[in-house]
Image (tube, rainbow, N blue to C red):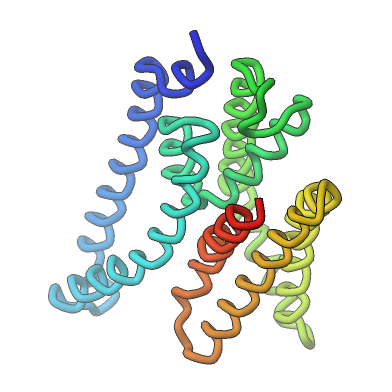
Amino acid sequence: MQIGEIMNSGVLWGFCLVVVAIVVFQGIVFTRSALQVRESVGMTAQEAKSAMKTGAIAAIGPSLGNIIIAVSLMTLIGNPLTMMRSAIIGSSATESLGAQMASSAYGTELGAANFGPEAFTTIAWTLCIGGTGWLIVTLFFTKSLGTFQKKITAKKNGTKKMVIISTAAMLGAFGYFAANEAVKSSGHTVVIVTSILITILTLLAANKLRQNWLKEWALGFAIIGGLTVGYFIG
């Protein structure tokens, strides 16, 4: 069986659909619970419906940004796994980074000629175990982390320190992979620089226009721009 057939097999579809169904069920339960307790916080039925509608509309922008990234990821790790991981984590960008790390650790690259069932299995286990770690931490340490964050932000320039820490972590992760690609050729470097510039310009536009949804689209725009430049210079 070819790797493409394995990544999109019926068995894998079945397991992934079960997981996605659980996520959908959770969303329904949370929505019903929110509507049931609306009166306890002084909200009318109309206000609750308006809040739900506003949240749904606000989610369209970030969702489309994730879809753009997910489409490119589908060609590399298949439709079922991409759908399942994006549904659980809610961030195709994070899953794309995890897939790259797993394939690199195995000794290959996404879409490479030597990318086989073993490499795909490594990616699947890495993404699932990584997601499990987040769930465990959330279950046992959410309250403690919230208290820790309050202590830091309560100090002078505490909020800025938290922003710096989170930004540094993301720059380190993405910078590691970008550096590995940049040294391959000048074309790779041009694509990376183009993507960086598009991301910066999108974030600046989001701040100037006060359109937060543009921030969620930044990575999607960077991918499209990088792919376009890579196509013409390749």
Residue at the location (67% across, 73% down)?
Answer: 197
Image height of 73 relative to 148, above or below? above
Residue placed furthest toward the bottom: 208
Can you tell which quarter of the image residue 171 is in?
Answer: bottom right
Residue at the spot x=35%, y=17% of the render? 10
Q: How many badges with numbers are in the image?
A: 0
Q: Is residue 56 left or right of residue 114?
A: left
Tell me, yes or no, if residue 173 can be seen here.
no
Q: Position of residue 2 (x, y in %)?
A: 51, 13
Looking at this view, name the residue that lies furthest to the top. 1
**What is the quadrant of residue 117 in the picture?**
top right
Work out whether 10 lies above or below 29.
above
Residue 225: image x %, image y %?
56, 63
Front residue of 55 and 234: 234
Along the line of sight, the residue nearer the viewer: 227 or 234: 234
At 57% across and 52% down in the image, what residue appears?
A: 93
The answer to whether residue 28 is above or below residue 60 is above
Residue depicted at x 21% and y 61%: 36
Say left or right for 125 vs 158: left
State the image coordinates of residue 192 (x, y, percent, origin top left). 71, 60
Residue 143: quadrant of the picture: bottom right
Could you say where residue 121 lies in the image, as x and y percent from the top left? 60, 20
Asked if residue 14 is positioned above or below residue 142 in the image, the reply reads: above
Q: Outermost residue toward the left?
A: 46
Report if residue 142 is visible in the image: yes
